[in-house]
Image (cartoon, rainbow, N blue to C red):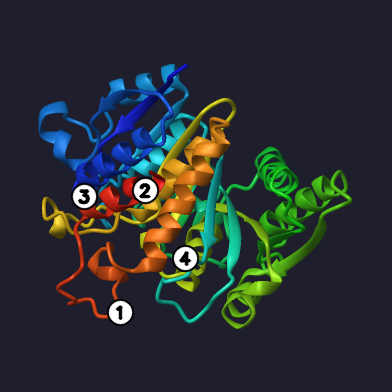
Amino acid sequence: MAHNVTLIRGDGTGPELVEAARRVLDATGVGFNWDVVEAGVDIMETAGTPLPQNVLDSIRKNKVALKGPITTPIGTGFRSVNVALRKELDLYACIRPCKYYPGIRSKYQDVDLIVVRENTEDLYAGVEYDVHSEEAKQIIAMSGGKIREDAAISIKPISETGSRRIAKTAFEYARQYGRKKVAAVAKANIMKYTDGLFFRMTAEVAKDYPEIEYQEVLVDNMCMQLVQKPELYDVLVMENLYGDILSDLCAGLVGGLGVAPGANIGNGMALFEPTHGSAPKYKGMNKVNPAALILSGMLMLRYLEEFDAADRLEKALSAVIAEGKDVTYDMKPDRNDPTAVGTSQMADAIIAKMG
């Protein structure tokens, strides 16, 4: 039976990356009915929004989506489509594997980490007030002098419900995939109510998984530990902002965002996407690395319980990377290497390896 999957083409380099990933996924032999939809800056002029209603409707109907990267303006413009999708669909768990594949340029080997990031709370909830707003003035007045009078305000909500369910996601993932350790990451020595609550809830959930080692690590210390000795860690669970930052750090350990996939999971619904951005300056150049989106497709296959196809795809991609011949410019020792191939050609090489 074919799987019904929403395919969001994205903007910038998104459409060409999505096409490469779609061809690789089709080549696994798994059947897909692709419902192709548009989101991002390229659709704004005609749709009036970067996230049209039909995109949300399609995901709610199909329950599974694969998404190309979408541009997020910095400081101005519309709020992130990626964040909006997670909020609208309550995709509360972001799972970002960071795994080293031989052949990738990196100072580290044998790194295999899973970052489990809470997706809906924290400063990403978007509860912010301009410095001149009445709300900001009221909060400043209530602070008893702890906040300067010319401050903009962001609110950091951390709930028992959100903390428990992301902790459970991390421990269930560890149990399903034979992982031995879960580390909760926060800054509870300073933010005693919010981050302290996160640690307490995670510790309570940990009691239901006695076979899995549990520890709590302060986020600043974890940054140092990951640079010094990442091999000591396995599954990391954390709040939204820390997860955004540390997942990039962990991706850097294994070669960068070009090999960093992501899964956003909710109750009976999932969206898969690469961690990297849309790289609009390379749009239409058949240049950028498709590995992160293809690996996101591999995570989607596992979610759909197509485990054999997922393993074959990962093995083929790993072989192409190890061989180092049919890879994009960023995966060559010299980024100006004239033998680097394009996005589509790297997808062709992966398909060929799957036989």
Q: Amino acid at mark 4?
A: Ala
Please say whether residue 137 is visible from this viewpoint: no
Residue on which disc 4 sits: 251
Residue on which disc 2 sits: 293
Q: Residue 139: x, y in percent?
A: 52, 53
Asked if marks 3 and 2 touch (Cβ < 8 Å), the reply is: no
The numbered mark, 1 or 2, whose residue comes first in the sequence reads 2
Does 94 sit above or below residue 341?
A: above
**Residue beneath the point at 77% across and 48% down:** 201
Badge nearest the viewer, 1 or 4: 1
Q: Marks 1/4: CA distance? A: 18 Å
Residue on which disc 3 sits: 344
- Element on which disc 4 rests: helix
The numbered mark, 3 or 1, whose residue comes first in the sequence reads 1
Q: Residue 289: x, y in percent?
A: 28, 58
Q: Amino acid at mark 1?
A: Pro
Asked whether 189 or 57 is in front, the reply is 57
Badge nearest the viewer, 1 or 2: 1
**Residue beneath the point at 26% across and 44% down:** 20
Residue on which disc 1 sits: 333
Q: Residue 195: x, y in percent?
A: 68, 58
Name the quarter where the C terminus is drawn: top left
Q: Marks 3/2: CA distance? A: 13 Å
